[in-house]
Amino acid sequence: MAYYRIEWKRSAQKELRHLPKEVLAGVLEIVAALSHEPIPTGARKLSSAERLYRLRIGDYRIIYSIHGARLVIEIVRVRHRRDVYRNLS
């Protein structure tokens, strides 16, 4: 079984700094699990983009893309649900 490499966009890394500590621990745990299972139970494909998926963590969302040919998962955004979909392209 092939494992995916996790890459973070610089903007997503900055967003991590603003998360509450209890949410941050859950985010990092779920993102680490994506390397084994890129589309876990509860992941939903976003209709607005070809390769974007979202995962829920309470009121927070992780937006990520899967690049299957390169075996890379890129974390695009980690924000509160009211802000995460704004200006998403």
Image (tube, rainbow, N blue to C red):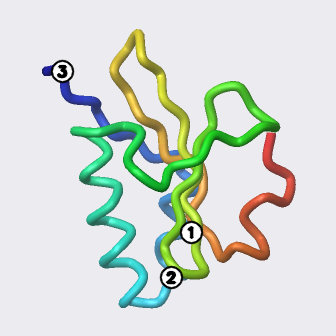
Residue 19 circle label:
2
Mark 2 vs 3, N-terminal side: 3
Tell me how far mark 2 sits from mark 1, CA to CA.
7 Å
Q: Is residue 87 left or right of residue 30?
A: right
Q: Amino acid at mark 1?
A: Glu
Image x and y of residue 53, in percent: 58, 43
The image quadrant that residue 24 belongs to is: bottom left
**Along the horizontal axis of the image, is 86 left or right of 17?**
right
Q: Against 84, is 72 above or below?
A: above
Q: Distance of mark 2 from mark 3, alpha carbons?
A: 31 Å
The residue lying at 52 percent from left, 57 percent from top is: 55
- Comparing marks 2 and 3, which lies closer to the viewer? 3
- Cβ atoms at labels 2 and 1 below 8 Å apart: yes
- Residue projecting furthest to the front: 41
Q: Which residue is mark 1?
A: 15
What amino acid type is highlighted by mark number 2?
Leu
Tag 3: amino acid: Ala
Which secondary structure lies at badge 2?
A: loop
Q: Vertically, is 19 above or below 43?
A: below
Lower sequence index among marks 1 and 3: 3
Residue picked out by circle 3: 2
Element carrying mark 3: loop
Mark 2, residues whose alpha carbon is within 10 Å: few (<14), some, or many (≥20)?
some
Comparing marks 1 and 3, which lies closer to the viewer?
Answer: 3
Q: Residues within 10 Å of mark 3 (few under 14, many from 20)?
A: few
Label 1 neighbour load within 10 Å: few <14, some 14-19, many 20+: some
Q: Residue furthest left?
A: 1
Q: Position of residue 89 (x, y in %)?
A: 80, 39
> How far across and how far down the image is residue 1, in percent?
13, 21
Which is more toward the observer, 2 or 12?
Answer: 2
Dividing the picture into quadrants, the one containing residue 3 is top left
- Which residue is farthest top? 69
